[in-house]
Amino acid sequence: MRMRIKTVVVCTICILAIVLAQSAVFGMEFSDVPITATYYNAVNKLSNEGIIQGRGDGRFGPRDKTTRAEFCAFVARANNYNENYYTTSGTPFTDVASDSWAQGYISYCYENGYVNGMTETSFSPNDNVTAEQAIKVVVCASGLGDDSLSKVGPMWYSGYVDVAKKSGLLDGGIYTIGLPATRAFVAQIVYNSMLIKGENKATGTDAVDVSGNRLSGGTTVAVVDSTVTNTYEPEDIWEPTDAEALEREYYQKVQYYGEDYEQYIKEEENSNNYTVADSDNEYEYIPIGSSDGMLIVIDPGHNNSGVDTGATGNGLREQDITFYIAEKLKPLLERNGFQVIMTRNSVKENVSTESVSASLARRADIANRNGADLFVSIHCNAGGGTGTETYYCTGSNDGKVFATYIQEGMLDEVGLRNRGVKNARYAVLRNTNMTAALVETGFIDSANDAKYLGSEKYQQAFAEGIAKGICNYVGIEYR
Ligand SMILES: [Zn+2]
Protein backbone atom coordinates (compact mmCIF):
# COMPACT_ATOMS: atom_id res chain seq x y z
CA MET A 1 0.00 0.00 0.00
CA ARG A 2 1.50 3.27 -0.97
CA MET A 3 0.91 6.22 1.27
CA ARG A 4 0.06 9.70 0.23
CA ILE A 5 -0.18 12.25 2.95
CA LYS A 6 -2.93 14.62 2.02
CA THR A 7 -4.11 17.78 3.61
CA VAL A 8 -7.58 17.14 2.27
CA VAL A 9 -10.22 16.74 4.96
CA VAL A 10 -12.53 13.93 3.96
CA CYS A 11 -14.73 11.43 5.72
CA THR A 12 -12.90 8.26 6.67
CA ILE A 13 -15.00 6.15 4.34
CA CYS A 14 -14.01 8.22 1.35
CA ILE A 15 -10.25 8.25 2.02
CA LEU A 16 -9.40 5.00 0.33
CA ALA A 17 -11.41 5.74 -2.79
CA ILE A 18 -9.90 9.20 -3.11
CA VAL A 19 -6.32 8.03 -2.58
CA LEU A 20 -6.75 5.26 -5.12
CA ALA A 21 -8.40 7.54 -7.65
CA GLN A 22 -5.67 10.17 -7.32
CA SER A 23 -2.91 7.59 -7.58
CA ALA A 24 -4.48 6.24 -10.72
CA VAL A 25 -4.66 9.68 -12.28
CA PHE A 26 -1.06 10.48 -11.36
CA GLY A 27 0.10 7.10 -12.61
CA MET A 28 -1.47 7.69 -16.01
CA GLU A 29 0.33 10.92 -16.64
CA PHE A 30 3.39 9.84 -18.58
CA SER A 31 3.70 6.36 -19.98
CA ASP A 32 7.46 6.37 -19.37
CA VAL A 33 7.37 7.73 -15.82
CA PRO A 34 6.22 4.83 -13.64
CA ILE A 35 5.15 5.52 -10.08
CA THR A 36 8.21 3.58 -8.98
CA ALA A 37 10.60 6.00 -10.69
CA THR A 38 12.60 8.15 -8.27
CA TYR A 39 11.69 11.21 -10.31
CA TYR A 40 7.96 10.43 -10.38
CA ASN A 41 7.00 13.08 -7.82
CA ALA A 42 9.26 15.69 -9.39
CA VAL A 43 8.04 15.17 -12.95
CA ASN A 44 4.37 15.09 -12.08
CA LYS A 45 4.53 18.07 -9.74
CA LEU A 46 6.41 20.18 -12.27
CA SER A 47 4.15 19.04 -15.07
CA ASN A 48 1.03 19.89 -13.06
CA GLU A 49 2.50 23.33 -12.36
CA GLY A 50 3.15 23.94 -16.06
CA ILE A 51 6.89 24.23 -15.42
CA ILE A 52 7.92 21.29 -17.57
CA GLN A 53 6.02 19.59 -20.37
CA GLY A 54 5.84 16.12 -21.80
CA ARG A 55 6.69 15.14 -25.35
CA GLY A 56 3.09 15.45 -26.52
CA ASP A 57 2.73 11.73 -27.19
CA GLY A 58 2.06 10.70 -23.60
CA ARG A 59 5.79 10.36 -22.88
CA PHE A 60 7.99 12.54 -20.74
CA GLY A 61 11.34 11.35 -22.10
CA PRO A 62 13.15 11.03 -18.74
CA ARG A 63 16.44 10.02 -20.33
CA ASP A 64 16.32 12.66 -23.06
CA LYS A 65 18.68 15.58 -22.90
CA THR A 66 17.71 19.20 -22.31
CA THR A 67 19.00 22.16 -24.27
CA ARG A 68 20.33 25.18 -22.44
CA ALA A 69 17.37 27.19 -23.76
CA GLU A 70 14.81 24.64 -22.52
CA PHE A 71 16.56 24.51 -19.19
CA CYS A 72 16.31 28.29 -18.81
CA ALA A 73 12.58 27.99 -19.45
CA PHE A 74 12.16 25.40 -16.66
CA VAL A 75 14.20 27.44 -14.21
CA ALA A 76 12.44 30.69 -15.09
CA ARG A 77 8.96 29.16 -14.74
CA ALA A 78 9.92 27.66 -11.39
CA ASN A 79 11.16 31.07 -10.21
CA ASN A 80 8.41 33.64 -10.49
CA TYR A 81 8.81 34.28 -14.21
CA ASN A 82 5.52 35.44 -15.63
CA GLU A 83 5.34 36.19 -19.32
CA ASN A 84 2.45 38.59 -18.70
CA TYR A 85 4.52 40.79 -16.43
CA TYR A 86 8.09 40.22 -17.54
CA THR A 87 9.83 42.64 -19.88
CA THR A 88 13.26 41.65 -21.03
CA SER A 89 16.04 44.15 -21.01
CA GLY A 90 18.01 42.03 -23.45
CA THR A 91 21.15 39.94 -23.30
CA PRO A 92 24.59 40.36 -24.86
CA PHE A 93 24.21 37.02 -26.67
CA THR A 94 24.32 37.26 -30.44
CA ASP A 95 23.07 33.66 -30.81
CA VAL A 96 19.81 34.35 -28.95
CA ALA A 97 17.52 35.99 -31.50
CA SER A 98 15.12 38.63 -30.20
CA ASP A 99 12.20 36.69 -31.70
CA SER A 100 13.34 33.34 -30.31
CA TRP A 101 10.78 31.55 -28.11
CA ALA A 102 13.44 31.23 -25.43
CA GLN A 103 14.59 34.83 -25.46
CA GLY A 104 12.47 35.88 -22.47
CA TYR A 105 13.49 32.88 -20.40
CA ILE A 106 17.19 33.28 -21.14
CA SER A 107 17.03 37.02 -20.42
CA TYR A 108 15.25 36.36 -17.15
CA CYS A 109 17.88 33.85 -16.02
CA TYR A 110 20.69 36.12 -17.18
CA GLU A 111 19.33 39.24 -15.46
CA ASN A 112 18.88 37.35 -12.22
CA GLY A 113 22.45 36.06 -12.36
CA TYR A 114 21.47 32.41 -12.77
CA VAL A 115 23.27 31.93 -16.08
CA ASN A 116 26.28 33.28 -17.91
CA GLY A 117 27.06 32.76 -21.54
CA MET A 118 29.56 30.30 -22.91
CA THR A 119 31.49 33.43 -23.87
CA GLU A 120 30.68 37.09 -23.31
CA THR A 121 28.61 37.21 -26.49
CA SER A 122 27.37 33.66 -27.01
CA PHE A 123 24.95 31.48 -25.05
CA SER A 124 24.79 28.30 -27.19
CA PRO A 125 21.04 27.89 -26.53
CA ASN A 126 20.80 24.67 -28.52
CA ASP A 127 23.66 22.88 -26.79
CA ASN A 128 22.69 20.33 -24.19
CA VAL A 129 22.94 21.53 -20.63
CA THR A 130 25.48 19.46 -18.72
CA ALA A 131 24.92 18.17 -15.20
CA GLU A 132 27.34 20.66 -13.66
CA GLN A 133 25.88 23.60 -15.60
CA ALA A 134 22.39 22.63 -14.45
CA ILE A 135 23.56 22.31 -10.85
CA LYS A 136 25.24 25.72 -10.95
CA VAL A 137 22.13 27.43 -12.32
CA VAL A 138 19.79 25.83 -9.79
CA VAL A 139 22.15 26.63 -6.89
CA CYS A 140 22.06 30.30 -7.96
CA ALA A 141 18.31 30.30 -8.62
CA SER A 142 17.64 28.72 -5.21
CA GLY A 143 19.58 31.45 -3.45
CA LEU A 144 22.06 28.90 -2.13
CA GLY A 145 25.04 30.58 -3.74
CA ASP A 146 26.27 32.83 -6.50
CA ASP A 147 29.15 33.24 -8.94
CA SER A 148 31.62 33.48 -6.06
CA LEU A 149 31.39 29.67 -5.80
CA SER A 150 33.06 29.34 -9.21
CA LYS A 151 36.56 27.94 -9.09
CA VAL A 152 39.31 28.49 -11.60
CA GLY A 153 40.15 25.55 -13.84
CA PRO A 154 38.42 22.37 -15.01
CA MET A 155 36.78 21.79 -11.62
CA TRP A 156 35.07 25.20 -11.76
CA TYR A 157 31.80 23.62 -10.64
CA SER A 158 33.01 21.90 -7.45
CA GLY A 159 31.84 24.68 -5.13
CA TYR A 160 28.32 24.54 -6.58
CA VAL A 161 28.20 20.74 -6.36
CA ASP A 162 29.32 20.84 -2.72
CA VAL A 163 26.61 23.34 -1.81
CA ALA A 164 24.03 21.42 -3.83
CA LYS A 165 24.84 18.17 -2.06
CA LYS A 166 24.77 19.70 1.41
CA SER A 167 21.46 21.42 0.82
CA GLY A 168 19.71 18.33 -0.53
CA LEU A 169 19.39 19.80 -4.00
CA LEU A 170 20.77 16.62 -5.57
CA ASP A 171 18.67 14.20 -3.49
CA GLY A 172 17.27 11.50 -5.73
CA GLY A 173 18.98 12.97 -8.78
CA ILE A 174 21.20 10.85 -10.99
CA TYR A 175 23.87 12.65 -12.96
CA THR A 176 27.38 12.40 -14.24
CA ILE A 177 29.59 15.46 -14.22
CA GLY A 178 30.61 16.31 -17.79
CA LEU A 179 27.64 14.59 -19.42
CA PRO A 180 24.33 16.10 -20.54
CA ALA A 181 21.74 16.31 -17.77
CA THR A 182 18.75 14.05 -18.36
CA ARG A 183 15.24 15.48 -18.21
CA ALA A 184 14.66 13.29 -15.15
CA PHE A 185 17.63 14.92 -13.41
CA VAL A 186 16.59 18.41 -14.46
CA ALA A 187 13.08 17.81 -13.14
CA GLN A 188 14.46 16.43 -9.88
CA ILE A 189 16.74 19.36 -9.07
CA VAL A 190 14.22 22.02 -10.10
CA TYR A 191 11.67 20.25 -7.89
CA ASN A 192 14.17 19.99 -5.03
CA SER A 193 14.97 23.68 -5.37
CA MET A 194 11.26 24.51 -5.03
CA LEU A 195 11.15 22.46 -1.83
CA ILE A 196 14.27 24.19 -0.51
CA LYS A 197 13.02 27.65 -1.36
CA GLY A 198 9.66 26.81 0.14
CA GLU A 199 11.29 25.78 3.38
CA ASN A 200 13.16 29.05 3.61
CA LYS A 201 10.40 31.34 2.49
CA ALA A 202 7.82 32.78 4.86
CA THR A 203 5.46 34.29 2.31
CA GLY A 204 5.95 35.15 -1.29
CA THR A 205 3.66 37.74 -2.74
CA ASP A 206 5.68 37.58 -5.92
CA ALA A 207 5.42 33.82 -6.18
CA VAL A 208 3.60 33.28 -9.43
CA ASP A 209 3.99 30.98 -12.36
CA VAL A 210 2.93 31.23 -15.98
CA SER A 211 -0.66 30.74 -14.90
CA GLY A 212 -0.33 33.28 -12.13
CA ASN A 213 -0.71 30.76 -9.34
CA ARG A 214 2.62 29.22 -8.62
CA LEU A 215 2.72 27.03 -5.53
CA SER A 216 5.56 27.60 -3.15
CA GLY A 217 6.97 25.02 -0.79
CA GLY A 218 5.45 24.36 2.57
CA THR A 219 3.78 27.69 3.08
CA THR A 220 0.60 29.27 1.87
CA VAL A 221 1.57 32.07 -0.44
CA ALA A 222 -0.34 35.03 -1.70
CA VAL A 223 -0.23 35.18 -5.48
CA VAL A 224 -0.77 37.96 -7.98
CA ASP A 225 -4.36 36.96 -8.37
CA SER A 226 -5.20 37.34 -4.69
CA THR A 227 -8.27 35.14 -4.95
CA VAL A 228 -6.03 32.11 -5.44
CA THR A 229 -3.90 30.61 -2.72
CA ASN A 230 -2.19 27.32 -2.76
CA THR A 231 -0.41 25.11 -0.31
CA TYR A 232 2.50 23.14 -1.57
CA GLU A 233 3.14 20.05 0.46
CA PRO A 234 6.77 18.92 0.55
CA GLU A 235 5.76 15.94 2.70
CA ASP A 236 3.51 14.64 -0.05
CA ILE A 237 5.97 11.87 -0.73
CA TRP A 238 5.30 8.41 -1.96
CA GLU A 239 6.50 5.71 0.43
CA PRO A 240 7.41 2.56 -1.47
CA THR A 241 6.86 -0.97 -0.22
CA ASP A 242 9.83 -3.35 -0.45
CA ALA A 243 8.62 -4.69 -3.78
CA GLU A 244 8.13 -1.19 -5.13
CA ALA A 245 11.54 -0.14 -3.83
CA LEU A 246 13.03 -3.02 -5.79
CA GLU A 247 11.24 -1.91 -8.91
CA ARG A 248 12.45 1.63 -8.30
CA GLU A 249 16.00 0.33 -8.24
CA TYR A 250 15.44 -1.20 -11.65
CA TYR A 251 14.41 2.19 -12.98
CA GLN A 252 17.44 3.81 -11.42
CA LYS A 253 19.54 1.32 -13.29
CA VAL A 254 17.65 2.07 -16.48
CA GLN A 255 18.73 5.65 -16.03
CA TYR A 256 22.32 4.52 -15.93
CA TYR A 257 22.29 1.91 -18.61
CA GLY A 258 19.75 3.25 -21.03
CA GLU A 259 17.55 1.28 -23.38
CA ASP A 260 19.70 -1.80 -23.30
CA TYR A 261 18.98 -2.31 -19.65
CA GLU A 262 15.29 -1.64 -20.14
CA GLN A 263 15.20 -4.40 -22.73
CA TYR A 264 17.00 -6.65 -20.32
CA ILE A 265 14.42 -5.96 -17.62
CA LYS A 266 11.61 -6.75 -20.03
CA GLU A 267 13.25 -10.09 -20.75
CA GLU A 268 13.58 -10.65 -17.02
CA GLU A 269 9.93 -9.90 -16.47
CA ASN A 270 8.85 -12.20 -19.27
CA SER A 271 10.80 -15.17 -18.01
CA ASN A 272 9.26 -17.26 -15.30
CA ASN A 273 11.72 -20.12 -15.15
CA TYR A 274 12.26 -19.96 -11.45
CA THR A 275 10.38 -21.10 -8.42
CA VAL A 276 9.71 -19.11 -5.32
CA ALA A 277 10.36 -20.96 -2.11
CA ASP A 278 7.76 -20.76 0.60
CA SER A 279 9.30 -18.14 2.83
CA ASP A 280 7.48 -19.55 5.87
CA ASN A 281 9.27 -22.83 5.30
CA GLU A 282 11.52 -23.88 8.13
CA TYR A 283 14.89 -24.17 6.52
CA GLU A 284 18.11 -25.24 8.15
CA TYR A 285 21.35 -24.92 6.29
CA ILE A 286 23.92 -27.63 6.96
CA PRO A 287 27.44 -26.31 6.31
CA ILE A 288 29.75 -28.33 4.08
CA GLY A 289 32.55 -28.04 6.63
CA SER A 290 35.48 -28.01 4.19
CA SER A 291 36.82 -25.83 1.41
CA ASP A 292 38.58 -28.82 -0.14
CA GLY A 293 37.97 -28.89 -3.88
CA MET A 294 35.48 -26.03 -3.76
CA LEU A 295 35.48 -23.59 -6.67
CA ILE A 296 34.28 -20.01 -6.25
CA VAL A 297 33.69 -17.67 -9.16
CA ILE A 298 34.18 -14.01 -8.27
CA ASP A 299 32.45 -11.60 -10.62
CA PRO A 300 33.75 -8.02 -10.48
CA GLY A 301 30.59 -6.28 -11.71
CA HIS A 302 30.50 -4.38 -15.00
CA ASN A 303 32.92 -3.77 -17.86
CA ASN A 304 35.76 -1.32 -18.26
CA SER A 305 34.16 0.21 -21.36
CA GLY A 306 31.45 -0.23 -23.97
CA VAL A 307 28.31 -1.93 -22.70
CA ASP A 308 27.39 -2.68 -19.09
CA THR A 309 29.72 -0.09 -17.62
CA GLY A 310 28.94 0.70 -14.01
CA ALA A 311 27.69 3.64 -12.04
CA THR A 312 29.88 6.64 -11.34
CA GLY A 313 30.11 9.14 -8.54
CA ASN A 314 32.57 11.16 -6.53
CA GLY A 315 35.24 10.63 -9.15
CA LEU A 316 34.95 6.83 -8.91
CA ARG A 317 33.80 4.25 -11.46
CA GLU A 318 31.94 1.21 -10.20
CA GLN A 319 33.68 -1.16 -12.62
CA ASP A 320 37.08 -0.20 -11.18
CA ILE A 321 36.08 -0.49 -7.52
CA THR A 322 34.43 -3.89 -8.04
CA PHE A 323 37.63 -5.17 -9.63
CA TYR A 324 39.86 -3.78 -6.89
CA ILE A 325 37.77 -5.51 -4.23
CA ALA A 326 37.63 -8.74 -6.26
CA GLU A 327 41.39 -8.91 -6.76
CA LYS A 328 41.86 -8.49 -3.00
CA LEU A 329 39.25 -11.17 -2.29
CA LYS A 330 40.86 -13.81 -4.53
CA PRO A 331 44.05 -14.43 -2.49
CA LEU A 332 42.08 -14.45 0.76
CA LEU A 333 39.86 -17.24 -0.53
CA GLU A 334 42.85 -19.15 -1.94
CA ARG A 335 44.57 -18.87 1.43
CA ASN A 336 41.50 -20.56 2.90
CA GLY A 337 41.70 -23.51 0.53
CA PHE A 338 39.25 -22.47 -2.20
CA GLN A 339 39.93 -22.49 -5.91
CA VAL A 340 39.01 -19.17 -7.50
CA ILE A 341 38.10 -18.03 -11.01
CA MET A 342 37.46 -14.38 -11.85
CA THR A 343 35.09 -13.29 -14.65
CA ARG A 344 37.41 -10.33 -15.30
CA ASN A 345 41.13 -10.75 -14.79
CA SER A 346 42.18 -7.14 -15.18
CA VAL A 347 40.59 -3.80 -14.45
CA LYS A 348 40.70 -3.02 -18.19
CA GLU A 349 38.90 -6.19 -19.26
CA ASN A 350 35.40 -6.36 -20.73
CA VAL A 351 33.46 -9.60 -20.29
CA SER A 352 31.48 -8.81 -23.43
CA THR A 353 31.25 -5.84 -25.76
CA GLU A 354 27.96 -6.95 -27.33
CA SER A 355 25.15 -5.94 -24.97
CA VAL A 356 24.26 -5.73 -21.31
CA SER A 357 22.38 -9.01 -21.43
CA ALA A 358 25.26 -10.74 -23.22
CA SER A 359 27.68 -9.38 -20.65
CA LEU A 360 25.56 -10.67 -17.79
CA ALA A 361 24.88 -14.02 -19.46
CA ARG A 362 28.60 -14.55 -20.05
CA ARG A 363 29.37 -14.10 -16.34
CA ALA A 364 26.87 -16.78 -15.36
CA ASP A 365 28.16 -18.95 -18.17
CA ILE A 366 31.72 -18.82 -16.86
CA ALA A 367 30.51 -20.10 -13.49
CA ASN A 368 28.25 -22.78 -14.98
CA ARG A 369 30.82 -24.15 -17.44
CA ASN A 370 33.46 -24.41 -14.76
CA GLY A 371 31.10 -26.18 -12.40
CA ALA A 372 31.59 -23.60 -9.68
CA ASP A 373 30.20 -24.29 -6.22
CA LEU A 374 29.68 -20.67 -5.25
CA PHE A 375 29.30 -17.40 -7.15
CA VAL A 376 29.78 -13.87 -5.82
CA SER A 377 29.08 -10.79 -7.92
CA ILE A 378 30.53 -7.55 -6.55
CA HIS A 379 28.87 -4.17 -7.17
CA CYS A 380 28.54 -0.63 -5.91
CA ASN A 381 25.11 0.84 -5.49
CA ALA A 382 23.89 4.22 -6.74
CA GLY A 383 20.79 6.34 -6.82
CA GLY A 384 20.89 8.34 -3.63
CA GLY A 385 21.25 6.13 -0.58
CA THR A 386 23.89 4.85 1.77
CA GLY A 387 24.97 1.49 3.12
CA THR A 388 25.58 -2.13 2.26
CA GLU A 389 23.13 -4.74 0.98
CA THR A 390 23.42 -8.26 -0.36
CA TYR A 391 21.10 -10.02 -2.79
CA TYR A 392 20.27 -13.67 -3.36
CA CYS A 393 18.09 -15.14 -6.04
CA THR A 394 14.41 -15.06 -5.17
CA GLY A 395 13.44 -18.53 -4.05
CA SER A 396 16.89 -19.81 -3.09
CA ASN A 397 17.16 -20.90 0.54
CA ASP A 398 20.90 -21.59 0.28
CA GLY A 399 21.33 -18.25 -1.46
CA LYS A 400 19.64 -16.48 1.41
CA VAL A 401 21.96 -18.04 3.99
CA PHE A 402 25.00 -17.37 1.79
CA ALA A 403 23.98 -13.72 1.30
CA THR A 404 23.29 -13.31 5.01
CA TYR A 405 26.77 -14.50 6.02
CA ILE A 406 28.43 -12.26 3.43
CA GLN A 407 26.35 -9.27 4.49
CA GLU A 408 27.32 -9.86 8.14
CA GLY A 409 30.97 -10.18 7.15
CA MET A 410 30.96 -6.81 5.36
CA LEU A 411 29.12 -5.10 8.21
CA ASP A 412 31.67 -6.45 10.71
CA GLU A 413 34.70 -5.39 8.67
CA VAL A 414 33.52 -2.11 7.14
CA GLY A 415 30.48 -1.05 9.13
CA LEU A 416 28.45 0.99 6.68
CA ARG A 417 24.70 1.20 7.25
CA ASN A 418 22.96 -2.18 7.12
CA ARG A 419 20.42 -2.16 4.27
CA GLY A 420 19.77 -5.83 4.76
CA VAL A 421 19.65 -9.02 2.74
CA LYS A 422 17.28 -8.84 -0.21
CA ASN A 423 16.15 -11.06 -3.01
CA ALA A 424 15.93 -10.24 -6.69
CA ARG A 425 16.04 -12.03 -9.98
CA TYR A 426 19.14 -10.36 -11.32
CA ALA A 427 20.48 -12.23 -14.33
CA VAL A 428 23.71 -13.34 -12.68
CA LEU A 429 21.75 -14.74 -9.73
CA ARG A 430 19.03 -16.41 -11.76
CA ASN A 431 21.22 -17.87 -14.48
CA THR A 432 23.92 -19.34 -12.27
CA ASN A 433 23.38 -23.00 -11.35
CA MET A 434 25.10 -22.76 -7.98
CA THR A 435 24.51 -20.84 -4.75
CA ALA A 436 25.05 -17.19 -5.58
CA ALA A 437 25.05 -13.74 -4.02
CA LEU A 438 25.36 -10.22 -5.36
CA VAL A 439 26.84 -7.65 -3.01
CA GLU A 440 26.17 -3.94 -3.21
CA THR A 441 29.13 -2.79 -1.15
CA GLY A 442 28.17 0.86 -0.82
CA PHE A 443 26.76 3.84 -2.74
CA ILE A 444 29.26 5.26 -5.16
CA ASP A 445 27.21 8.47 -5.42
CA SER A 446 27.19 8.98 -1.65
CA ALA A 447 30.09 11.15 -0.51
CA ASN A 448 30.33 9.13 2.70
CA ASP A 449 30.26 5.66 1.13
CA ALA A 450 32.59 6.74 -1.68
CA LYS A 451 35.28 7.54 0.90
CA TYR A 452 35.24 3.85 1.83
CA LEU A 453 34.88 2.51 -1.71
CA GLY A 454 37.77 4.61 -2.98
CA SER A 455 40.10 3.71 -0.14
CA GLU A 456 42.45 0.77 -0.62
CA LYS A 457 42.25 0.01 3.07
CA TYR A 458 38.47 -0.34 2.97
CA GLN A 459 38.52 -2.22 -0.33
CA GLN A 460 40.64 -4.73 1.59
CA ALA A 461 38.12 -4.63 4.46
CA PHE A 462 35.23 -5.35 2.05
CA ALA A 463 37.25 -8.28 0.64
CA GLU A 464 37.94 -9.62 4.14
CA GLY A 465 34.28 -9.25 5.10
CA ILE A 466 33.17 -11.18 2.02
CA ALA A 467 35.85 -13.86 2.57
CA LYS A 468 34.88 -14.28 6.24
CA GLY A 469 31.22 -14.54 5.26
CA ILE A 470 32.03 -17.25 2.72
CA CYS A 471 34.10 -19.19 5.27
CA ASN A 472 31.25 -18.96 7.79
CA TYR A 473 28.81 -20.21 5.16
CA VAL A 474 31.03 -23.15 4.29
CA GLY A 475 31.63 -23.79 7.99
CA ILE A 476 35.40 -23.40 8.15
CA GLU A 477 37.50 -21.15 10.33
CA TYR A 478 38.78 -18.08 8.51
CA ARG A 479 42.55 -17.87 8.57
ZN1 LIG B 1 26.50 -2.72 -10.49
Image (cartoon, rainbow, N blue to C red):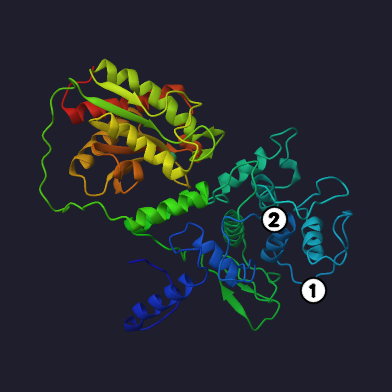
Instruction: Name the disc covering residue 141, or none.
Output: 2
- Expressed as whole percent of the image width and height from the top left, the position of residue 28 reads 48, 72
Which amino acid, mark 2?
Answer: Ala
Which amino acid, mark 1?
Answer: Tyr
94 up-or-down from 402: above or below: below
Q: What residue is at 25 percent from the left and 25 percent from the top?
A: 295
User: Could you tell whether 197 is left or right of 23 in the image?
Assistant: right
Q: Earlier in the sequence, mark 2 or mark 1?
A: 1
Label 2 CB sits under 8 Å from any ligand 1 atom: no
378 up-or-down from 84: above or below: above
- Expressed as whole percent of the image width and height from the top left, the position of residue 425 reads 31, 49
Q: Mark 2: which secondary structure?
A: helix
Which residue position holds label 1?
85
* Crowd around label 1: few <14 · some 14–19 · many ≥20 (10 Å): few
* Crowd around label 2: few <14 · some 14–19 · many ≥20 (10 Å): many
User: Is 155 or 208 nearer to us in this picture?
Assistant: 155
Quarter of the image for the N terminus: give it.
Answer: bottom left
